Image (cartoon, rainbow, N blue to C red):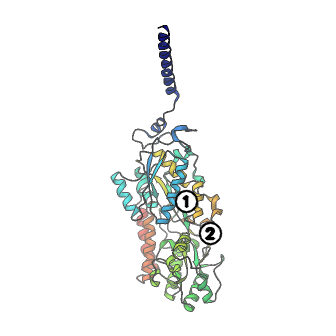
Amino acid sequence: MFAKKWYSLLSLFLVLCLVLAACGGNETEPEATSAAGDATGDDGNDVGDVPDTGDTGDATGDCFMEVEEGATITFSGWGDATEQQIYRDSIERFSEVCPTVTVNYEPIPEEFQTKLKAAMAGGTAPDVFYVDDQLMTAFAPNGQLLPLDDLMAEAGVSADDFLPQLMPIFTLDGQIYALPKDWGTLGLVYLPEAFEAAGIDAPTEDWTWDDLREAANVIAENTDYAGYCQAADWARFAPWVFSAGGTFASADFTAASLDTPEVKEMAQMQKEMLDEGSLVRPSDVGAGWCGEAIGKELVGLTLEGGWMVNFMRTDYPDVDWRTSLIPQGPAGRADIIFTNGLGVNGFTQFPRASAAFVFYVTGAENQGEIVSTGFAYSTHPEQADLIVDENDAAIAQGGLLEDSKVAYWGPNTGRVNNAVSQALERLYLGDQDVDAAFAQAQDEAQQALDEVAPQ
């Protein structure tokens, strides 16, 4: 009887010890959501003063920064099957780094901007999405993009990590709203067989636009190939203008500069080339774009970017094509830089997890993996030597020239660039001469710049 009572008392004592131990453990165990909740506020949108979390422990798995527990985010962008695979692979790599975050990829290959704006208005926009200059203009001033500065500081990410030419497009009032996910530029793309057939030397890095014109003439007059291919496109026209010392608008985005001698000199040269037959548009040779004209071996040369590597490898693997540095103009050598970024929905329920995904995808580790595919160039300048394809490397040189620039003219960049394309279209069609075409473009661009409210 005594033994039974003693056994009962001992059992009760052990149970009480276990209960007290459990209570004591709860006092020191970190709550996975407490820090994130304090940072994001009740609505999950205002990141406020982000704490210096250091080691995030079990709350975030192995992620490099603290993220919300159980975060599931949606990521959307445009792009063909090749580009979509690039980002599926990026998501897989991110999942190894931040295993507690689930990323659902929902690409929107067509009408991305239209559909994204509608989704934002309806409250169904993805957590992370591609951002170009037009979406930056539409979303950042209205709080629909999350400022990233505080979270960047926590994660050890700096604007200085990226090519400096890429950052202004994603910065408003001193705050960063997206980070560049990749960049591209233009190079001189040509068919060696066309030059051999014409009996002339292939392009070199010493070439000028005059050399391009002369070679295009010889090819057009003496072979079955057309000469130089270019559509009425502001982007392909931009290197001509930049290398002549011209630009589309002033540095402060207040004054259009499309009726200047530098712009009109290069437009006049292209009109003369069209008239003499050394310049053709892709539609003139039955192609949808000039890269396709190269693939179909219809033209001798054109300006295209690094996307030609995968395009030719996939669609025209048997065609021998080469690249060279962009030609030099009257004032030097300069190229255009294309870039898009990744931004975070200002109303996401998971701002920290979304930002972590942006930081990883745009970070050096993942950028190096993307470079190896030949899809795009790393946004980190120290990785310029990672480009392995010879043609791709030659094209990339143009974007690293000192005077190369992103054709960004403030919130109405799209309208300014469209004014240039439309001026070229009128010029190519013979509807206007250079002076009239670019006087009209100047008025249209200036109106677009004037409509931008002071920031």
Residue position marked by numbered label 1 in the rendering: 166
Given residues 30 and 195, the one toward you in this image is 30
Given residues 436 and 25, the one toward you in this image is 25
The reply to whether residue 163 is visible in this rendering is no
Secondary structure of the residue carrying tag 2 is loop
- Counting other residues with Cα less than 10 Å from the Cα at mark 2, is it few (<14), some (14-19), or many (20 or more)? some
Q: Quadrant of residue 423?
A: bottom left
Query: Horizontal placement of 348 versus 158: left or right?
Result: left
- Counting other residues with Cα less than 10 Å from the Cα at mark 1, is it few (<14), some (14-19), or many (20 or more)? many
Query: Horizontal placement of 43 versus 380: left or right?
Result: left
Q: Residue furthest front?
A: 1
Q: Position of residue 303 (x, y in %)?
A: 55, 75
From mark 2 to mark 1, how far is it between C-alphas? 23 Å
Q: Amino acid at mark 1?
A: Leu
Q: Is residue 275 above or below residue 318?
A: below
Q: Position of residue 66 (x, y in %)?
A: 52, 41
Q: Is residue 348 above or below residue 32?
A: below
Label 2 vs 1, first from the N-terminus:
1
Counting labels gives 2
Residue ID at (46%, 69%): 417
Q: Is residue 8 above or below residue 294?
A: above
Secondary structure of the residue carrying tag 1 is helix
Q: Quadrant of residue 204?
A: bottom right
Q: Position of residue 443 (x, y in %)?
A: 42, 70
Q: Amino acid at mark 2?
A: Asp
The reply to whether residue 100 is visible in this rendering is yes
Mark 2 vs mark 1: give the one in front. Answer: 2
Q: Position of residue 149 (x, y in %)?
A: 52, 47
Q: Is residue 52 above or below residue 14?
A: below
Residue position marked by numbered label 2 in the rendering: 389
Residue ID at (50%, 65%): 82
Q: Residue furthest bottom?
A: 222
